[in-house]
Image (cartoon, helix red, strand yellow):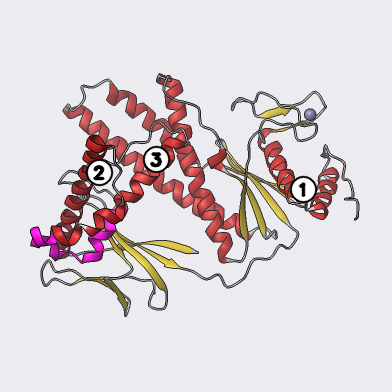
Amino acid sequence: MQLTEKIKIHPTEEQVDVLWTTSNFCRLTYNFALTERQEAWKKEQRSVKYEEQQNKLPEMKEKFPQYKMVYSKVLQGTLKKLDANYKSFFALRKNGDTSARPPAHRGKNYFFTIVYNQSGFKFKDGKITFSHKVNEVPLSFEIERDYENKNVKQVEIFNSDPYKARGDWYISVTYEYEPEVQYHDNGLYQAIDAGVTKMVTAVNSQGKFFEAKTARSDRYWNKKIDTAKSRRDHCKKGSKQWVRLNNNIKKMERKRSNQNKDYQHKLSKKMVENTRANTIIVGDLKVKKMAKSKKLKGKRKKGLNRSTQNQGFLSRFIGFLTYKAEKVGKKVIKIDESYTSKECYVCKKRHKMPLYQRTMSCDCGNTIDRDRNSAINIMERFLLQNALWTGYRYFADNLRQTGLKMGIEFLEPIPG
Ligand SMILES: [Zn+2]
């Protein structure tokens, strides 16, 4: 599996100049390749592939020798980035996310992320050094972590606020990681329902629940950001006041995102460490159908945008959980979670469950917190789909002991 780590760097002024020069060539390459794709589509309804664009790089460098200042793989990395951006855009659209925007041209004040793929970087004595031919200034940075013996695939240099590079400087290192412990199914499971108000509700084979609320900071910032946005939208777009408020909003969004990320790192670590289960089951967020947002306006649209954004947060959380689990020989398995929040886990009757409804009360007599109901459903679905009868019986027995009953009585599979 691959892991990516983010490390702060402190470039000198001279180094920042080199970074800007390199970034600029990358940006121009990106814009150029983007135009080519757009034109080919407009004129010939033809989609241009990555390989085609990569093959044109030598020709471009002959025509514009200044591009030779950039390490050659970096320009390739830029084209790959464009390709990846297109792919993720199409994937989001396919998923029903109408707020997804196609890749756009980047202005000259935008610090374009520099991608070193496979080569052009070297780790030695606590330093990373990047190849370039801009001038004689070495692009070398001290880093605390040691990658000398690691199989590093890619390093990116970026700024946390790319517009005019006003934020902090970072590199992100992606490397191949071999877990020390190999996964084996130890017969213990944990099922997780990831949601909006409560970030996770988990139930394990012992029938015990674990709950964690969405980070407080999230709710705190959401409120502030909403207020600022409505103030901004009452100003004339582009006016001094508007720009000021808009910058403020961006700053707050960044803070929210950082605090969220920290929280998710801590929570996923805790969840992996605190369970004896080697197998963690989560609902596959991709399967969740998103409402069509075309006709939505105002509040409902905002609500949907927020839920799309939440979807992003949650899938990042699942990502954290997955690699933290793999590191210690555990495994995260995704299963289709359709109707897990709507079906009563006892009698399987489906209910309308709008988000504000926190409790499921079924006429079969089952009354339970909505997220706990989902978690049980996810666990049950996984065990049954995989014919894990022993695990199922163990889970059902334990639930019964905690006062909950399972709908399906356990049946011994008929031998032969
Ligand atoms: Zn029921």
Label 3: which secondary element? helix
Q: Mark 1 points at which residue?
A: 207
Residue 90: mark: 3
304 and 78: which one is in front?
Answer: 78
Mark 1 and mark 2 residues within 8 Å of each other at the beta carbon: no
Q: Name the residue under label 2.
A: 37
Residue 292: mark: none
Q: In which quarter of the image is residue 59?
A: bottom left
Label 2: which secondary element? helix
Q: Which of marks 1 and 2 is in front?
A: 2
Rounded to the nearest angstrom, the CA distance separating label 1 from label 2 is 54 Å
Mark 3 and mark 2 residues within 8 Å of each other at the beta carbon: no
Q: Which amino acid does label 1 sit on?
A: Gly
For mark 2, does the 10 Å Cα neighbourhood hold few (<14), some (14 to 19), or many (20 or more) residues? some
State the residue at coordinates (67%, 57%).
279
Is the residue at mark 1 in contact range of ligand 1, meaning its CB lies under 8 Å from it? Answer: no
Rounded to the nearest angstrom, the CA distance separating label 3 from label 2 is 14 Å
For mark 1, does the 10 Å Cα neighbourhood hold few (<14), some (14 to 19), or many (20 or more) residues? many
Residue range highlighted in magenta: 61-80
Q: Which of marks 3 and 2 is nearer the N terminus?
A: 2
**Within the magenta stretch, is there residue 65?**
yes
The quadrant in which the C terminus is found is bottom right
Q: Which residue lies furthest to the bottom in this view?
A: 125
Residue 148 at x, y percent in the picture: 38, 77
State the residue at coordinates (42%, 26%).
302
For mark 3, does the 10 Å Cα neighbourhood hold few (<14), some (14 to 19), or many (20 or more) residues? some
Q: Residue furthest front?
A: 44
Q: Quadrant of residue 130?
A: bottom left
Q: Earlier in the sequence, mark 1 or mark 2?
A: 2
State the residue at coordinates (48%, 33%).
307
Assign the magenta stretch its main secondary structure. Answer: helix
